[in-house]
Image (cartoon, rainbow, N blue to C red):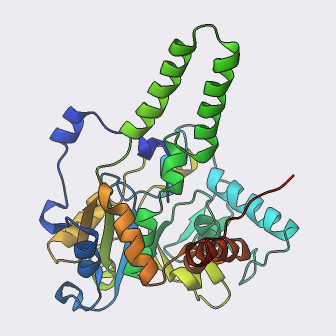
Amino acid sequence: MLHKAEAVHMSAETEKNKKDLFKDVTISCETAREFLDNLDLTHPRWSRQNWIFRGQNDARWQLMPSLYRTWERGTNPGLELALIRLFISNANLANLPIPNNSLGYYSDAFKPTVRELSAGARYDFSHVVFAIAQHSGVPTRLLDFTHSPLVAAYFAVDTTNLFKAIGMGSDQLAEYFRQCAHCLVEEEDVIAKVTELAYKVQGCYELLPDEIAVWAVHAQDLGDYTTIKLLEHPFTEILPLRMQKGVFLCDTDFEELDVQQGKDWPSFDKKLAILVETKGIFKLTMPYTQIEALHDLLTLHRYSPAVVKPSYEAVAKQTVAAAYEIFGYTNKTTE
């Protein structure tokens, strides 16, 4: 749900002059407890059923699919379909199944999600392979949402990809420290080198957001008032979607030639802004400084990486962390 361009702050002047389309439906929460209380599905705000949610590390980010954020304009015609083909090929090599016929993304059916290529072939981006690829980190035109507000909150506070994007990932920071240690031995001007590296780290911290956000969209209003469609795939055969109650939004009203040629695409913001009038969209924000507190509350609700992103590795990490808490166990590596 993240890319490097998102992590770069807009200038103060641009931010000041930017019109907030969702000002009237933004709920600003000061604490993690207040944020979670507002996301509780028993809250009167959610009295109409069938809401879907999306968490974002930075409240300033637009609602824009990953394909549109990362694709350079005027390059790689047909990039999306090429990515899908390669994803299927690599999934096959890894013996991972693609439900519902992996070649089913080619379609002759007349549906709003069917697109025609220049050669005359058609493909259908409502096919489950697009959802699996998007969910696994491949850029597509789909935008991830979930039926669960707590899953959305989990992803809003899961800043792993945010840190990597702005240069604060463990590998980048490790490299900074390695260079610092190296210059203590090798560099003549140690102070200058350490200062240079310190400014790099400081610059990364300055890119951190002020607020996180969880978006809520009413699925019925979405279908009634916009050309953005909800794609919901059966969870049974797709474990990550089942655990995260994942669904996807896609825009069915745009020029396909523009997509194929990598031209400018608008975010979903303007089309979704019409739902402000129906109270069919809300944006809940919380200070970034409350992330740890919210993380602790979500853990009490049993929303942890081992549950939201199930794997034996995630379970093992959670096991070792719990052992440390309970028994004071430390996992020391011996040579």
Q: Looking at this view, is 276 or 105 the one in front? A: 276
- In terms of image quadrants, where is residue 176? top right
Residue 108 in view of the camera: no
Give x and y (percent) for residue 312.
73, 77
Give x and y (percent) for residue 318.
62, 74
- Is 50 placed left or right of 129 in the picture? left
Q: Is residue 213 above or below residue 113?
A: above
Give x and y (percent) for residue 281.
24, 73
Q: Is residue 59 above or below residue 299?
A: above
Give x and y (percent) for residue 276.
18, 70
Q: Is residue 4 above or below residue 178?
A: below
- Is 289 placed left or right of 146 in the picture? left
Q: Is residue 111 above or below residue 174?
A: below
Q: Residue at image x 42%, y 46%?
A: 6
Q: Residue at image x 71%, y 55%?
A: 82
Q: Residue at image x 61%, y 60%?
A: 137
Q: Looking at this view, is 67 or 108 the one in front? A: 67
Q: Kindly give the residue lying farthest to the top in the view shown.
A: 188
Q: Looking at this view, is 266 or 298 the one in front? A: 298
Residue 141 in view of the camera: yes
Number of numbered labels in the structure image: 0
